């Protein structure tokens, strides 16, 4: 879309937001989300244009109205879940969509490879884990591995591991996100490629034994 047409289609809306501010928090949040979409488009196609600075200025004013000038009607925790987190996701929803699609692509590759190569599952998950799982399936207890050990110790381990992985992915973001795609050999941290392949292979193994839905209900809840 040409810049002139983009301005013509949205100028009245922007002027309304700029000169007729709203005191309703929900309406302000809705306006802010709309402006974020417009600003993302403008930054993509007209990064050095005056209209980009104009939209940014209006969005900044509404942002201040939401977070600084409004009455403290909600607690900080409630405001975070009500406004800040949804707006954050909305602002970066294209990035989240892209990374999700890339991850699902890797999952699909794992499923396809496991379907067409019997040795692929063992190559990804290891003989020991596959043998143990098959033995548990034969015993009628396919998810027996998740019943052992202390629930508290497992909770602590999973929490610490997830925090560590999140921290490493944040560091990877400073390197253009490239390290988040592949395994970090020294720290043995799996990236999107490794994790996606493992997830696809892992789920295919259970689906091939008719345990797909049960595996999702048991294992995914266990992991979260």
Image: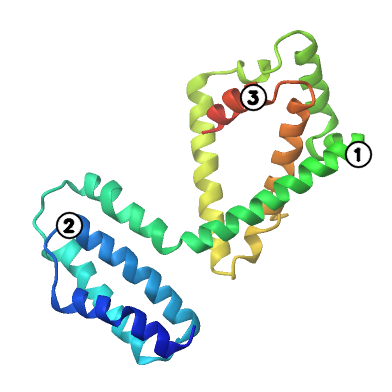
Q: Are marks 2 and 1 in contact (CB under 8 Å)?
A: no
Distance of label 2 from label 1 (alpha carbons) = 56 Å
* Visible residue check, residue 191: no
Mark with earlier residue (2, 3): 2
On residue 213, which mark appears? 3
The quarter of the displayed image where residue 128 is located: top right
Residue 52 falls left or right of residue 59? right
Residue beneath label 2, please? 25
Residue beneath label 1, please? 117
**Residue at (65, 52) in percent of width and height:** 103
User: Which one is in front, 208 or 67?
Assistant: 208
Mark with earlier residue (1, 3): 1
Mark 3 lies on a secondary structure that is helix
Compared to 162, does 217 lie above or below?
Answer: above
Distance of label 1 from label 3 (alpha carbons) = 23 Å
Compared to 48, does 55 lie above or below?
Answer: above
Q: Residues within 10 Å of mark 3 (few under 14, many from 20)?
A: few
**Percent coordinates x, y for residue 71 in the rendering:** 8, 56
On residue 39, which mark appears? none
**Percent coordinates x, y for residue 70 in the rendering:** 11, 60
**Percent coordinates x, y for residue 202 in the rendering:** 73, 34
Mark with earlier residue (2, 1): 2
**Residue at (76, 33) in percent of width and height:** 204
**Residue at (47, 23) in percent of width and height:** 152
Q: Nearer the viewer, mark 1 or mark 3?
A: 3
């Amino acid at each position: 879309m040409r810049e002139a047409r983009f301005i013509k289609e949205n100028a009245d809306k922007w002027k309304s937001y700029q000169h007729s501010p709203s005191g309703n928090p929900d309406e302000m949040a809705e306006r802010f989300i709309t402006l974020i979409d417009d600003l993302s488009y403008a930054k993509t196609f007209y990064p050095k244009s005056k209209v980009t600075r104009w939209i940014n200025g209006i969005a900044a004013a509404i942002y201040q109205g939401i977070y600084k000038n409004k009455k403290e009607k909600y607690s900080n925790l409630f405001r975070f879940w009500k406004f800040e987190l949804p707006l954050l996701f909305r602002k970066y929803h294209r990035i989240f969509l892209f990374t999700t699609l890339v991850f699902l692509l890797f999952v699909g590759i794992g499923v396809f490879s496991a379907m067409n190569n019997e040795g692929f599952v063992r190559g990804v998950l290891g003989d020991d884990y596959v043998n143990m799982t098959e033995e548990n399936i034969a015993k009628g207890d396919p998810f027996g591995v998740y019943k052992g050990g202390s629930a508290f110790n497992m909770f602590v381990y999973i929490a610490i591991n997830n925090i560590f992985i999140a921290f490493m992915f944040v560091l990877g973001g400073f390197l253009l996100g490239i390290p988040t795609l592949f395994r970090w050999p020294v720290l043995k941290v799996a990236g999107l490629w490794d994790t996606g392949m493992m997830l696809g292979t892992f789920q295919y193994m259970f689906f091939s034994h008719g345990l797909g839905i049960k595996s999702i209900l048991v294992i995914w809840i266990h992991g979260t």
